[in-house]
Amino acid sequence: MTDHYAVIGNPISHTKSPLIHGLFAQEARQDMQYTAIEGPVEPDTAFADVVRKFAAGGGKGMNVTAPFKLKAFAMADERSERAALSGAVNAMKFEGGRILADNFDGIGLVRDIEINLGLPMAGKRVLMLGAGGAARGALLPFLEAKPAELVIANRDVAKAQALAAQVAGRGAVVACGYADLEAMGRFDLVVNATSASLTGDLPPVPPSIFRPDGMAYELAYGKRLTPFLRLARNAGVRNLADGVGMLVEQAAEAFAWWRGVRPDTRPVIDRLTVPLD
Ligand code: ATR
């Protein structure tokens, strides 16, 4: 019998999830169907109604994207620790009338950096720009990768400090503002987890943060050479990445959680990769 899954968001027409999961299912020989659902933003309870209806109709799981990650978090019966810390959910599994929830964005990002791009984070100096949902989701998986130091920089410094305080004791993490970065030396990995690139903006970072033999990672996918990646390239960084690998790896985590089989991500990443130039 065909098992049903879906991604829910609004808008949803841009989503690559059905393509990614379709390719995974083909490769892993899984009898499943994966569709895209445009979730209702109003009234407030409508999102939860659509999810429950999907589950009641035999749906096995859902991916959740903007703007519903917090609502999915709120309606879950059980949440993983990383979902609890990020306050956001990007994958749900429906089992025995219960909603189990997780967030694979951060672990997908770490797998992409460490496995696909070949930069083990252990012992490295890592800088995360931003303290919104994307940064929050990455925090615990990043610390589990044991960097020598994780610096969170944000315009609103109090937000970065609150994030760092939440994970104090889980690793070497400090918070600062952009103006402090000049004095903090070079980083092996700089991740842009702000939403600045979505509007063509650049967080006000000095080029001195980059090591030419390090990596600059832009979370936004398919935006080509964003102002952030351009700054890194001008600073001599050759290893530039956008979020395509993270997108595919987080999907693979959800797929493995649902199906018990880990799909091969390489061909899917290759297929979705958009050249930066
Ligand atoms: P979400 O939770 O959906 O990721 P968010 O909470 O609004 O969205 O977070 C967006 C992040 O991008 C924040 O870290 C924000 O910085 P502030 O917390 O200081 O507002 C950051 N951001 C957005 N536009 C930016 C810009 N032009 N320059 C620098 N940081 C920016």
Image (tube, rainbow, N blue to C red):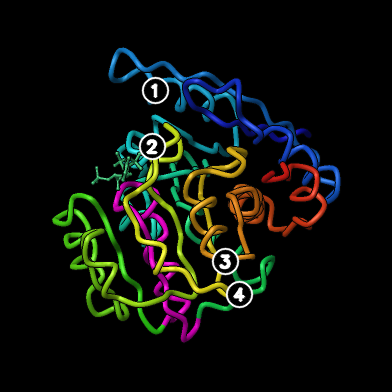
The residue that disc 4 covers is 119
Q: Is the Cβ of the residue at disc 2 closer than 8 Å to that at disc 1?
A: yes
For the N terminus, which image quadrant? top right
Q: Position of residue 247 (x, y in %)?
A: 60, 47
The residue that disc 1 covers is 47
Q: Is residue 121 left or right of residue 247?
A: left
Q: Is residue 247 left or right of residue 107?
A: right
Q: Secondary structure at mark 1?
A: helix
Looking at the rendered structure, the kind of residue marked 1 is Phe
Label 3 Cα neighbours within 10 Å, binned few <14 / some 14-19 / many ≥20 = some
- Between disc 4 and disc 1, the foreground one is 4
Between the residue at mark 2 and the residue at mark 4, the CA separation in whole angstroms equals 32 Å
The residue that disc 3 covers is 236
Q: Secondary structure at mark 3?
A: loop
Is ligand 1 closer than 8 angstroms to the Cβ of mark 3? no
Q: Residue at x 51, y 77 (%)?
A: 121
State which tag comes first along the sequence, 3 or 1: 1
Q: Which mark is residue 72?
A: 2
Q: Nearer the viewer, residue 182 or 73?
A: 182
Q: Nearer the viewer, residue 78 or 136?
A: 136
Quarter of the rendering containing residue 119: bottom right
Q: Which residues are magenta?
A: 122-147
